[in-house]
Image (cartoon, rainbow, N blue to C red):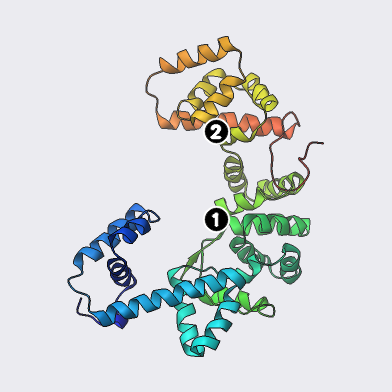
Amino acid sequence: MATKNTELSGKQKAAVLLISLGPDVAAQVYKHLSEEEIEQLTLEISSVQKVNSTEKEEILEQFHQIALAQDYITQGGIGYAKEILEKALGENEASNIIGRLTSSLQVKPFDFARRADPSQVLNFIQNEHPQTIALVLSYLDSDQSGQILSQLPQELQADVARRIATMESTTPEVINQVEQILEKKLSTTVFQDYTETGGIQAVVEVLNGVDRSTEKTILDSLEIQDPDLAEEIKKRMFVFEDIVTLDNRAIQRIIREVDSEDLRLSLKVSSEEVKELVFNNMSNRMAETFRDEMEVMGPVRLREVEEAQTRVVASIRRLEEVGEIVVARGGGDDIIV
Protein backbone atom coordinates (compact mmCIF):
# COMPACT_ATOMS: atom_id res chain seq x y z
CA MET A 1 0.00 0.00 0.00
CA ALA A 2 1.97 2.92 -1.31
CA THR A 3 -0.16 5.85 -0.17
CA LYS A 4 0.55 7.68 3.03
CA ASN A 5 -1.67 7.16 6.08
CA THR A 6 -3.32 10.56 5.71
CA GLU A 7 -4.45 9.59 2.20
CA LEU A 8 -5.94 6.24 3.14
CA SER A 9 -9.71 5.86 3.09
CA GLY A 10 -11.63 4.62 6.10
CA LYS A 11 -12.04 1.18 4.51
CA GLN A 12 -8.32 0.95 3.78
CA LYS A 13 -7.48 1.85 7.38
CA ALA A 14 -9.96 -0.77 8.61
CA ALA A 15 -8.30 -3.35 6.37
CA VAL A 16 -4.86 -2.49 7.73
CA LEU A 17 -6.20 -2.63 11.29
CA LEU A 18 -7.66 -6.13 10.84
CA ILE A 19 -4.47 -7.37 9.18
CA SER A 20 -2.49 -5.99 12.11
CA LEU A 21 -4.78 -7.58 14.69
CA GLY A 22 -4.45 -11.03 13.13
CA PRO A 23 -6.94 -13.57 11.71
CA ASP A 24 -8.46 -14.70 15.04
CA VAL A 25 -9.43 -11.18 16.13
CA ALA A 26 -10.49 -10.25 12.58
CA ALA A 27 -12.82 -13.26 12.52
CA GLN A 28 -14.47 -12.06 15.74
CA VAL A 29 -14.91 -8.56 14.26
CA TYR A 30 -16.53 -10.04 11.15
CA LYS A 31 -19.28 -11.52 13.33
CA HIS A 32 -20.52 -7.98 14.07
CA LEU A 33 -20.58 -6.78 10.43
CA SER A 34 -23.25 -6.99 7.75
CA GLU A 35 -22.71 -9.10 4.63
CA GLU A 36 -22.12 -5.98 2.55
CA GLU A 37 -19.55 -4.64 5.03
CA ILE A 38 -17.76 -7.99 5.11
CA GLU A 39 -17.66 -8.11 1.32
CA GLN A 40 -16.27 -4.56 1.00
CA LEU A 41 -13.72 -5.05 3.78
CA THR A 42 -12.56 -8.38 2.35
CA LEU A 43 -11.96 -6.72 -1.01
CA GLU A 44 -9.86 -4.03 0.68
CA ILE A 45 -7.86 -6.62 2.63
CA SER A 46 -7.21 -8.62 -0.52
CA SER A 47 -5.85 -5.51 -2.28
CA VAL A 48 -3.30 -4.72 0.43
CA GLN A 49 0.15 -5.71 -0.79
CA LYS A 50 2.40 -4.49 2.00
CA VAL A 51 1.96 -2.36 5.11
CA ASN A 52 5.02 -0.60 6.48
CA SER A 53 5.55 -0.35 10.23
CA THR A 54 4.94 3.42 10.34
CA GLU A 55 1.51 3.11 8.70
CA LYS A 56 0.63 0.23 10.97
CA GLU A 57 1.58 2.09 14.14
CA GLU A 58 -0.27 5.26 13.11
CA ILE A 59 -3.46 3.37 12.31
CA LEU A 60 -3.31 1.36 15.54
CA GLU A 61 -2.80 4.60 17.49
CA GLN A 62 -5.78 6.25 15.75
CA PHE A 63 -7.94 3.25 16.58
CA HIS A 64 -6.78 3.33 20.20
CA GLN A 65 -7.59 7.05 20.53
CA ILE A 66 -11.04 6.63 18.99
CA ALA A 67 -11.76 3.65 21.29
CA LEU A 68 -10.77 5.76 24.30
CA ALA A 69 -12.95 8.65 23.10
CA GLN A 70 -15.91 6.30 22.62
CA ASP A 71 -15.41 5.04 26.17
CA TYR A 72 -15.39 8.64 27.46
CA ILE A 73 -18.60 9.37 25.52
CA THR A 74 -20.25 6.34 27.13
CA GLN A 75 -19.22 7.62 30.55
CA GLY A 76 -20.35 11.22 30.21
CA GLY A 77 -21.25 12.28 26.68
CA ILE A 78 -19.37 14.03 23.87
CA GLY A 79 -18.69 17.14 25.92
CA TYR A 80 -17.02 15.08 28.64
CA ALA A 81 -14.96 13.12 26.08
CA LYS A 82 -13.75 16.29 24.41
CA GLU A 83 -12.77 17.85 27.73
CA ILE A 84 -10.71 14.81 28.77
CA LEU A 85 -9.03 14.53 25.37
CA GLU A 86 -8.17 18.24 25.32
CA LYS A 87 -6.41 17.90 28.65
CA ALA A 88 -4.47 14.88 27.43
CA LEU A 89 -3.75 15.75 23.81
CA GLY A 90 -4.54 19.41 23.26
CA GLU A 91 -7.50 21.14 21.63
CA ASN A 92 -6.65 20.47 17.98
CA GLU A 93 -5.94 16.76 18.36
CA ALA A 94 -9.03 16.33 20.56
CA SER A 95 -11.19 17.98 17.88
CA ASN A 96 -9.68 15.71 15.21
CA ILE A 97 -10.40 12.58 17.23
CA ILE A 98 -13.96 13.60 18.05
CA GLY A 99 -14.50 14.50 14.39
CA ARG A 100 -13.28 11.08 13.23
CA LEU A 101 -15.38 9.39 15.90
CA THR A 102 -18.64 11.14 15.05
CA SER A 103 -18.26 10.38 11.33
CA SER A 104 -16.93 6.82 11.61
CA LEU A 105 -19.11 5.64 14.50
CA GLN A 106 -22.04 7.88 13.59
CA VAL A 107 -22.55 9.50 16.97
CA LYS A 108 -25.85 11.25 16.44
CA PRO A 109 -26.57 14.89 17.17
CA PHE A 110 -28.47 15.71 20.38
CA ASP A 111 -26.54 13.02 22.27
CA PHE A 112 -26.84 15.14 25.43
CA ALA A 113 -30.63 15.33 24.99
CA ARG A 114 -30.90 11.53 24.91
CA ARG A 115 -29.19 11.51 28.31
CA ALA A 116 -31.49 14.20 29.72
CA ASP A 117 -34.81 13.86 31.46
CA PRO A 118 -37.68 14.20 28.93
CA SER A 119 -39.27 16.97 31.01
CA GLN A 120 -36.07 19.01 30.72
CA VAL A 121 -35.98 18.60 26.95
CA LEU A 122 -39.68 19.53 26.81
CA ASN A 123 -38.95 22.79 28.63
CA PHE A 124 -36.34 23.68 26.02
CA ILE A 125 -38.34 22.91 22.89
CA GLN A 126 -42.05 23.33 23.65
CA ASN A 127 -42.15 26.92 22.44
CA GLU A 128 -40.10 26.27 19.30
CA HIS A 129 -41.47 25.89 15.76
CA PRO A 130 -43.19 22.50 15.19
CA GLN A 131 -40.52 21.57 12.60
CA THR A 132 -37.79 22.20 15.17
CA ILE A 133 -39.62 20.06 17.73
CA ALA A 134 -40.07 17.30 15.13
CA LEU A 135 -36.35 17.34 14.28
CA VAL A 136 -35.31 17.02 17.93
CA LEU A 137 -37.84 14.26 18.68
CA SER A 138 -36.74 12.27 15.63
CA TYR A 139 -33.24 11.99 17.13
CA LEU A 140 -34.35 10.98 20.64
CA ASP A 141 -35.13 7.48 21.84
CA SER A 142 -38.73 6.53 21.05
CA ASP A 143 -39.66 6.35 24.76
CA GLN A 144 -38.36 9.88 25.34
CA SER A 145 -40.08 11.21 22.23
CA GLY A 146 -43.34 9.55 23.21
CA GLN A 147 -43.31 11.14 26.66
CA ILE A 148 -42.50 14.57 25.25
CA LEU A 149 -45.14 14.30 22.51
CA SER A 150 -47.75 13.37 25.12
CA GLN A 151 -46.98 16.55 27.07
CA LEU A 152 -47.22 18.95 24.12
CA PRO A 153 -50.47 20.91 23.64
CA GLN A 154 -53.02 18.85 21.73
CA GLU A 155 -53.11 21.32 18.86
CA LEU A 156 -49.35 20.72 18.38
CA GLN A 157 -49.26 16.93 18.75
CA ALA A 158 -50.66 15.94 15.35
CA ASP A 159 -48.67 18.65 13.56
CA VAL A 160 -45.39 17.45 15.08
CA ALA A 161 -46.23 13.79 14.41
CA ARG A 162 -47.00 14.60 10.76
CA ARG A 163 -43.71 16.49 10.39
CA ILE A 164 -41.74 13.55 11.82
CA ALA A 165 -43.46 11.16 9.44
CA THR A 166 -42.80 13.29 6.35
CA MET A 167 -39.23 14.31 7.29
CA GLU A 168 -36.58 12.96 4.94
CA SER A 169 -33.04 14.33 5.30
CA THR A 170 -31.61 17.30 7.15
CA THR A 171 -28.34 19.06 6.32
CA PRO A 172 -25.58 19.40 8.92
CA GLU A 173 -26.05 23.19 8.83
CA VAL A 174 -29.70 22.98 9.87
CA ILE A 175 -28.91 20.40 12.56
CA ASN A 176 -26.18 22.67 13.87
CA GLN A 177 -28.58 25.63 14.10
CA VAL A 178 -31.13 23.58 16.02
CA GLU A 179 -28.47 22.22 18.37
CA GLN A 180 -27.57 25.78 19.31
CA ILE A 181 -30.98 26.03 21.00
CA LEU A 182 -29.86 23.43 23.54
CA GLU A 183 -26.18 24.37 23.62
CA LYS A 184 -26.56 26.10 26.99
CA LYS A 185 -26.66 22.70 28.70
CA LEU A 186 -23.93 20.90 26.80
CA SER A 187 -21.85 21.61 23.69
CA THR A 188 -22.07 18.90 21.06
CA THR A 189 -20.31 17.91 17.87
CA VAL A 190 -22.33 17.58 14.71
CA PHE A 191 -22.19 14.40 12.69
CA GLN A 192 -21.01 15.95 9.42
CA ASP A 193 -23.12 14.15 6.89
CA TYR A 194 -26.61 14.25 5.48
CA THR A 195 -28.52 12.37 8.13
CA GLU A 196 -31.71 10.44 7.51
CA THR A 197 -34.23 11.18 10.25
CA GLY A 198 -37.94 10.89 10.76
CA GLY A 199 -40.12 8.95 8.38
CA ILE A 200 -43.26 6.94 9.02
CA GLN A 201 -41.47 4.27 11.05
CA ALA A 202 -40.04 6.97 13.31
CA VAL A 203 -43.47 8.40 14.11
CA VAL A 204 -44.84 4.88 14.64
CA GLU A 205 -42.13 4.25 17.25
CA VAL A 206 -42.95 7.57 18.90
CA LEU A 207 -46.68 6.86 18.96
CA ASN A 208 -46.01 3.43 20.43
CA GLY A 209 -44.51 5.29 23.37
CA VAL A 210 -47.47 7.56 24.09
CA ASP A 211 -50.63 6.82 26.03
CA ARG A 212 -53.77 5.63 24.23
CA SER A 213 -55.64 8.95 24.48
CA THR A 214 -52.71 10.90 22.99
CA GLU A 215 -52.37 8.38 20.17
CA LYS A 216 -56.08 8.65 19.38
CA THR A 217 -56.00 12.47 19.41
CA ILE A 218 -53.04 12.55 17.01
CA LEU A 219 -54.42 9.92 14.63
CA ASP A 220 -57.87 11.53 14.58
CA SER A 221 -56.28 14.86 13.61
CA LEU A 222 -54.07 13.23 10.99
CA GLU A 223 -57.09 11.49 9.44
CA ILE A 224 -58.50 14.96 8.73
CA GLN A 225 -55.20 16.51 7.56
CA ASP A 226 -53.75 13.55 5.66
CA PRO A 227 -55.94 10.40 5.56
CA ASP A 228 -53.41 8.35 3.56
CA LEU A 229 -50.62 9.09 6.04
CA ALA A 230 -52.87 8.26 8.99
CA GLU A 231 -53.81 4.92 7.39
CA GLU A 232 -50.17 4.03 6.70
CA ILE A 233 -49.22 4.84 10.29
CA LYS A 234 -52.09 2.71 11.61
CA LYS A 235 -50.94 -0.24 9.50
CA ARG A 236 -47.52 -0.13 11.13
CA MET A 237 -48.68 0.53 14.68
CA PHE A 238 -49.45 -3.16 15.22
CA VAL A 239 -48.22 -5.89 12.89
CA PHE A 240 -49.47 -9.48 12.77
CA GLU A 241 -46.45 -10.91 14.61
CA ASP A 242 -47.24 -8.58 17.54
CA ILE A 243 -50.04 -11.00 18.43
CA VAL A 244 -47.51 -12.61 20.79
CA THR A 245 -47.85 -9.55 23.06
CA LEU A 246 -51.57 -10.18 23.62
CA ASP A 247 -53.07 -12.25 26.42
CA ASN A 248 -55.00 -15.50 25.91
CA ARG A 249 -58.38 -13.83 26.33
CA ALA A 250 -57.57 -11.39 23.52
CA ILE A 251 -56.32 -14.19 21.25
CA GLN A 252 -59.53 -16.15 21.78
CA ARG A 253 -61.62 -13.08 20.97
CA ILE A 254 -59.62 -12.47 17.79
CA ILE A 255 -60.08 -16.09 16.68
CA ARG A 256 -63.86 -15.67 17.00
CA GLU A 257 -63.80 -12.32 15.21
CA VAL A 258 -61.65 -12.86 12.12
CA ASP A 259 -62.39 -14.85 8.98
CA SER A 260 -60.98 -18.38 9.28
CA GLU A 261 -59.46 -18.25 5.80
CA ASP A 262 -57.70 -14.97 6.64
CA LEU A 263 -56.31 -16.54 9.81
CA ARG A 264 -55.05 -19.62 7.97
CA LEU A 265 -53.34 -17.47 5.36
CA SER A 266 -51.87 -15.20 8.03
CA LEU A 267 -50.37 -18.14 9.91
CA LYS A 268 -48.87 -19.58 6.70
CA VAL A 269 -45.59 -17.64 7.04
CA SER A 270 -45.76 -16.61 10.70
CA SER A 271 -43.26 -17.72 13.35
CA GLU A 272 -43.70 -20.94 15.30
CA GLU A 273 -44.25 -18.83 18.42
CA VAL A 274 -47.27 -17.12 16.84
CA LYS A 275 -48.68 -20.40 15.50
CA GLU A 276 -48.40 -22.14 18.85
CA LEU A 277 -49.98 -19.22 20.68
CA VAL A 278 -52.96 -19.21 18.32
CA PHE A 279 -53.35 -23.01 18.30
CA ASN A 280 -53.13 -23.15 22.12
CA ASN A 281 -56.14 -20.85 22.29
CA MET A 282 -58.24 -23.09 20.05
CA SER A 283 -59.96 -26.30 20.95
CA ASN A 284 -57.89 -29.41 20.12
CA ARG A 285 -60.24 -30.26 17.27
CA MET A 286 -60.15 -26.75 15.79
CA ALA A 287 -56.35 -26.58 16.04
CA GLU A 288 -55.98 -29.97 14.35
CA THR A 289 -58.33 -28.91 11.56
CA PHE A 290 -56.39 -25.67 11.06
CA ARG A 291 -53.09 -27.53 10.84
CA ASP A 292 -54.48 -30.03 8.33
CA GLU A 293 -55.99 -27.29 6.15
CA MET A 294 -52.74 -25.30 6.20
CA GLU A 295 -50.79 -28.38 5.07
CA VAL A 296 -53.04 -29.02 2.08
CA MET A 297 -53.26 -25.31 1.23
CA GLY A 298 -50.18 -25.49 -0.97
CA PRO A 299 -48.09 -22.52 -2.13
CA VAL A 300 -49.74 -19.11 -1.91
CA ARG A 301 -48.65 -15.68 -3.08
CA LEU A 302 -46.92 -13.63 -0.41
CA ARG A 303 -49.14 -10.69 -1.37
CA GLU A 304 -52.22 -12.73 -0.46
CA VAL A 305 -50.73 -13.58 2.93
CA GLU A 306 -49.85 -9.94 3.62
CA GLU A 307 -53.36 -8.82 2.64
CA ALA A 308 -54.89 -11.41 4.98
CA GLN A 309 -52.61 -10.28 7.83
CA THR A 310 -53.62 -6.67 7.19
CA ARG A 311 -57.30 -7.64 7.54
CA VAL A 312 -56.59 -9.52 10.77
CA VAL A 313 -54.66 -6.54 12.18
CA ALA A 314 -57.54 -4.23 11.20
CA SER A 315 -59.90 -6.47 13.19
CA ILE A 316 -57.55 -6.33 16.17
CA ARG A 317 -57.52 -2.53 16.08
CA ARG A 318 -61.35 -2.46 15.86
CA LEU A 319 -61.60 -4.73 18.89
CA GLU A 320 -59.18 -2.48 20.75
CA GLU A 321 -61.11 0.66 19.85
CA VAL A 322 -64.36 -0.72 21.28
CA GLY A 323 -62.56 -1.89 24.41
CA GLU A 324 -62.91 -5.66 23.91
CA ILE A 325 -59.17 -6.33 23.99
CA VAL A 326 -56.14 -4.49 25.38
CA VAL A 327 -53.05 -3.80 23.28
CA ALA A 328 -50.09 -2.90 25.49
CA ARG A 329 -48.42 0.44 24.71
CA GLY A 330 -46.49 3.23 26.42
CA GLY A 331 -47.98 5.33 29.19
CA GLY A 332 -50.01 4.00 32.07
CA ASP A 333 -53.58 3.88 30.75
CA ASP A 334 -53.43 0.18 29.78
CA ILE A 335 -52.23 -1.15 33.13
CA ILE A 336 -54.71 -3.71 34.46
CA VAL A 337 -55.22 -3.63 38.24
Dot 2: element: helix
Q: Is residue 123 above or below residue 160?
A: below
Q: In which quarter of the image is the C terminus?
A: top right
Residue 230 coordinates in the image, percent (x, y): 62, 46
Q: In this view, does 158 lie above or below 337?
A: below
Q: Which of 106 and 76 is in front in this view?
A: 76
Mark 2, residue position:
310
* Mark 2: amino acid: Thr
**Relative to residue 95, is residue 119 drawn left or right?**
right
Residue 144 coordinates in the image, percent (x, y): 68, 58
Q: Is residue 91 above or below residue 219?
A: below
| Viewer can see residue 191 | no
> Going from the N terminus, do you reach mark 1 or mark 2 first?
1
Mark pair 1, 2: CA separation: 21 Å
Q: Is residue 182 above or below residue 303?
A: below
Residue found at x 79% / y 36% = 336
**Relative to residue 260, is residue 218 drawn left or right?**
right
| Viewer can see residue 207 | yes
**Relative to residue 80, is residue 265 drawn left or right?**
left
Mark 1, residue position:
199
Identity of the residue furthest to the right in this view: 337
Residue found at x 25% / y 80% = 53
What crowding class fits label 2: few (fewer than 14 Cα within 10 Å), some (14-19), or many (20 or more)?
A: some
Dot 1: element: loop
Residue found at x 25% / y 65% = 44
Residue 311, picture quadrant: top right
